[in-house]
Structure formats: structure tokens, C-alpha cells
Amino acid sequence: MSGVTILCTVYNKERFLPEVIAAIWRQTPELPRQFLFVDDGSRDRSVAIARALTRDWPNCRIVERKNGGPSAATNTGIELATMPWLKLVGSDDVLAPYATRRLIDIAEATGSEAVFGRIGFYKDPSEIVFDAAAAATTHASVPDDPVAEVIRRGVSGTSPTIFRTETVKRAGACDPDVFVEDFSLALRVARLGKIARWEHIVTWGPAADESRIMVGQGHQAHHDYALAIANFLRAHPDMEARYGKLAFHRAAGRAWKYARRAAGLGWTSKYAWLNLQSYLGPFGPAAEAIRRTMDVYALGEGPKIKPILRVGARS
């Protein structure tokens, strides 16, 4: 029988945790479950709340660690995961009651190593609505080229996903040199097998939560996209040969868009030229070309408030 490890990483989310934890408890009660909460050095009451709300849960563990970022916290939990399926949950994301069951069903039906659903964002909790009827009838698609799919479309958080635990561990979990966890994990898993896309909202998160990376630190997310893909290509020369041009094009395009919108740079900037060059190719190792796009994310107002966080020697 299938079982699932539900892993929630936590950092200063005390006001969201009660609803998040209640939604976690509703996941797959018919299956064996392992509950893991990894607190990444919270300075608020997150740990106390998690302990109080899960005190009677079977097979539940709360791990406290020194702050190291989402990738490090996720990897701590992955090491402890024992069930065949891994359901990651952000500590301000509310899961649909059917989220985990439906994601597992899709993965098993398609033979996929991971399934990526969608996340919605609310301004008021009253906007959180899940459509169980649509969930039952909305079919998933399986891209022909999983790595190209992840590079081209990216991922949006980990809460709308399911992974085969064994595949995640075989892939090496999240890139420890990258602060944000989602993109590097998706890339590494996609290299090892099929993935599925499910165009259905399976979780909702707060739109105005400044502690969310994509809300308050978009420059960090874009920087880490580029770093994750550069590290991935460098680690796998066969991936560099097949996907280097596509990856450089995506990274350069993102950098040029950021340069215009956030930094006010124009066509004479190096990012404009890198973007134009990306239509032809990197003219050398793609990983190095991608790294040349990354310093743009130190520009603009965002990094002045929250500088780029670098956790690895190569970042």
C-alpha cells in the first residue's frame, strides 16, 4: 500500500500555521502517513504552535535546526522521509482536502516521478475555494521532454507537487548551493524520469505575505533560478549539450526583463546584449553564460531591502 511523507518546512509563519496544519491533517487519512515539520530557526511562536496542534498525531516529528534557508530545511526533511511518496508543503499554503490523494493517483496513472499542480493566491482567506468536481475531471499532461518542460515553464513553489521519495533521494534532493528549493529539485527529478503537469489549483497561499520569496524577494527567486540551472548544467555535461541553448535563452530573457523593470536599464546594458546573444547560443559553456546574467539581481530597490542570500561556495 502506498504511503506518504508530508513535509512542512517552517520559518516565522505563526499566523498561518493553524490553517496550514489543519489542512495537512485532512490529507489521505486512508493511507499510512509520516508527518515531518522542519523549523528553520524561527524567531516567533511557530514551533510552539506546531507542537501544540500536532501533539496527538501519530508518526509525527518536529525538527528544529539553525536557519539555513528553504533548500537546507527541505533537505533535512528529505533525509528523514520514509514513505514512498513525498508531499512538500509551504508553511503558509493551505492544501485542498483532496490534493495529496489526487496527485498520487495522477503520478501512479502516468508513471511519473513527480506531478506539478498549480497554486492560487488570496488576498482574503474567504477567497480560498477548492473545486473537487473539477479535480476529479481535470486530466494531467505528460510532457515529452521533462527537463525542457521544467526549464521552459519553471515551477511555482513546492506545495502543489508530489514526488516519489526514492527518486528525490536518488536525485540528490535540492541543490544545497541554492537558497530557494523548488526549481533545483524539479530539475534534478526531471532528469531521472517522467513528470506530469496538472492544471488545477491544489493549494492557496497569501498574496501579500512579504516573507514569501516570490512576493517580497522576487530578485532572490530569479537569481536562484539562474544559479540552479547553471549548477545543474555544470554537474551534467550531457544536459549542457542538450539544453544549454534553451537554458541560456530563458535565463538571459529573465535577466533582461528584470534589468528593464527593476533596474531601469536600457538597450545599451550588457543584459540586453546577453538576451540578443541567447537567440543564437551561448558561444561557450552555457553554465558560464548563465552566470553572467546573475549580477543583475543585485540591482534595483528589492536587493537594497533584502540582499541576495547566498548559501553555497559557488553562488
Image (spheres, rainbow, N blue to C red):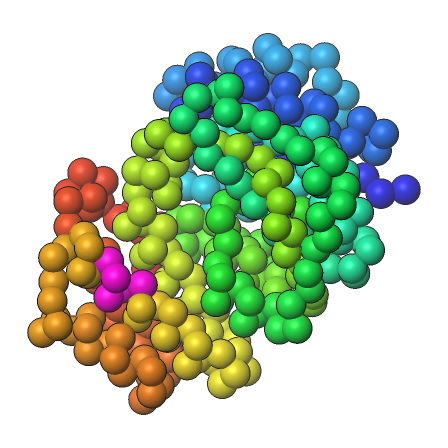
Task: Assess whether residue 257 is covered by the magenta stretch.
Answer: yes
Observer-nearest of 22 and 207: 207
178 up-or-down from 191: above or below: above
Q: Quadrant of residue 193?
A: bottom right
Expressed as whole percent of the image width and height from the top left, the position of residue 20 reads 57, 24
The magenta-colored residue range is 254-258
Majority secondary structure of the magenta segment?
Answer: helix
315 and 250: which one is in front? 250
Q: Can you give x and y, in whole percent of width and height, for residue 199 in the image?
A: 61, 50
Of residue 38 and residue 104, the one placed in the foreground of this image is: 104
Q: Is residue 165 visible?
A: no
Q: Residue at x 61, y 65 (%)?
A: 190
Q: Nearer the viewer, residue 34 or 157?
A: 157
* Side of 270 where 229 appears, left or right: right
Which residue appears at 69% of the width and 64% of the height? 142
At horizontal 60% and vertical 21% (from top left) the residue drawn is: 21
Q: Is residue 16 magenta?
A: no
